[in-house]
Amino acid sequence: MTCSYSKEFSSVGFTDVENVFIYEYLPISSGNAVKVYLYGLFLCNNKDFDQPIENVAETLKMTVDEIIDCFKYWEEFGLVSIVSKNPLSIQYLPVRSAYSGGKPRKFKAEKYTEFSKSLQALLPNRMIGTGEYTEYYSIMENYGIKPEAMLMIVKYCTDRKGKDISYRYISKVAKDFGNRGIVTVEKVEKELSSYILRTSEIEKILKALSLKRQPEIEDLNLFKKWTQELHFEVESIIFAASALKKGSINKLDEFLLELYSIKCFSKEEISAYMQEKKKIYELAIRINKALCIYMDVIDTVIDTYTAKWLSYGFIDQTLLFVASHCFKIGKNTLQYMDELLETLRNRGCIDLSSVGDYFDSIKKTDEFIAKLLLTAGVNRRPNPWDRENLTTWKSWNFSEEMILEAAKLSAGKTSPIAYMNGILSKWKNSGIYTLSAVTETPIATANSQEEYNREYEKRRRIALSKAQSNLEKAMSINGFSDIYSKLNSIEKDLAFAELYSNTDALKALEKEKEELNAKLRLTLAQAGLTPEDLSPKYRCEKCQDTGYVGTKRCDCFSKPE
């Protein structure tokens, strides 16, 4: 059941007001403040009339800000508590508990009677509200600003901004003075005199920034910082401002701090720095164009990449050449280019000639690998794994001629590259490094080789089938698929990191791989499996040696009978 008063019933009801409010608070408060307090009290007693603050403002013929200021005023006296500002929620407190028997706490109106009259005279175009008076009283109490000094601050603000100036601006300036200990008439007068003396210089700075406004006290504070703390001459500040062309006073402050950090103080030093910065800016844009990418904020690119590359000793032409190379191979990102430049730097390839030689060697390597793959009957492009294999084979002291011979012998096999690895490994262990030695020492007779191939293919199929069955079983385990996919992906990243000698990335990837393998073992254990069970294995019946298809063969099995 819900019961409520009708509007007619409520209109003939009563709203109780404690007498102490009428005796002590009403005489010292403005009409708007009293009106807001009473209407809020009325709403407390008549919940049916609760309404948005906009409706209350319309009813009381006041603005929302004025109502909020009035409640702040009563909160200062402890008569209400602002529980929430959005939406506005006010809690009324007992007047007796806020009143201690003497005068109402917080500000004593009589203390600021003369100040209030003088303040209103300085702002004749509008009536000063209770909230605004309270703000000024609070500032004077908190910062110890004398009323006469506060009036000087208000007059300064009206002279700069006009009679209709916002009290929030006055409050901001007054707090700035208070924070700096400028609280007496003498100190305020001295500060304003100093400001007036510097006004013409500040105006020149604002003009250089294309700012069409009058100097403000905050500008003077920054001006003092630039000249007294950073030790810039006025001419240098104006020159720096003109270099920005269009900007804010805060942007100029950031720029002067930047100049100070690199100890550029004179016009000549600033000019040289600006020219160099412009060159770097233009270079960053050209590099992005060469990579065929677009960046909204070039400054970030300069700070993260371009400036670092130049500090390594790379010149414009070299950087643009590398960018063009990255685009051609489909790796057109700043991150990849950064990794490639780190590799070049570690190899001592800094100038254009040495970088070109490095890329030529990579190109020649890929051309040889392409020939090798074609010889082995593999129809695809070279990849990092191929380059890694070639590096390994050459480290075994095999010539390209011998490697191609192994490719010929591997043609037609199920896994030609793996078969090549087996042949070259066999040659290495047997000390065979020339074509003539290969001819003189055949690996196997035709019959035994044919028998070997049949047996190997048979065992390979069995091993693959078993591995596939184990993999399907593993895939049914919750979480296995995600770990397995990440491990496969990380192998490619490791190949690239190792190829380009990216030590940091290599360490991070190896650590991640180790963690993933640990998770994989725990996950597989749920089904009684191990990671080894997922790889195609075979076992030699003669020596019981276990290996993996395509990577290892026992000696006794590969020897002819």
Image (cartoon, helix red, strand yellow):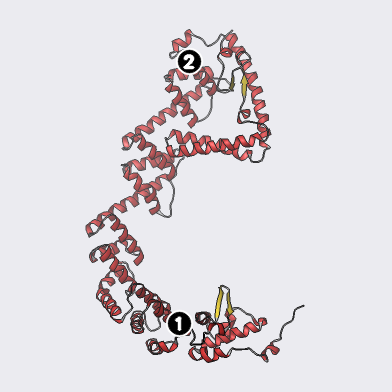
Q: Where is residue 471 in the image (x, y as percent from the top left)?
A: 65, 32
Q: Which residue is drawn at 61% across and 34% down?
A: 521
**Residue 464 occupies quadrant:** top right
The residue that label 1 is drawn on is 134
- How far apart marks 1 and 2 lie (CA) works out to 95 Å
Looking at the image, do the residues carrying marks 1 and 2 touch, with CB atoms under 8 Å apart? no
Q: Residue at x 32, y 45 (%)?
A: 310
Q: Residue at x 44, y 33 (%)?
A: 499
Please state which amino acid type lies under the numbered disc 1: Thr
Between 257 and 348, the one lying in front of the other is 257
Please state which amino acid type lies under the numbered disc 2: Asn
Point out the frontmost of discs 1 and 2.
1
Lateral position of residue 14 relative to residue 78, left or right: right
Q: Is residue 242 above or below residue 447?
A: below
Q: If the image is split into quadrants, where does the C terminus sit?
A: top right
Q: What element carries label 2?
A: helix
Q: Position of residue 450 (x, y in %)?
A: 60, 12
Q: Exactly how many numbered labels are in the figure?
A: 2
Which class describes the residues within 10 Å of circle 2: few (<14), some (14-19), or many (20+)? few
Lateral position of residue 66 relative to residue 55, left or right: left
Which class describes the residues within 10 Å of circle 1: few (<14), some (14-19), or many (20+)? many
Q: Is residue 556 above or below residue 519?
A: above
Can residue 363 be seen by looking at this rendering? yes
Q: In this view, does 68 lie above or below 468?
A: below
Q: Position of residue 514 (x, y in %)?
A: 53, 36
Can residue 216 be seen by looking at this rendering? no
The residue that label 2 is drawn on is 429
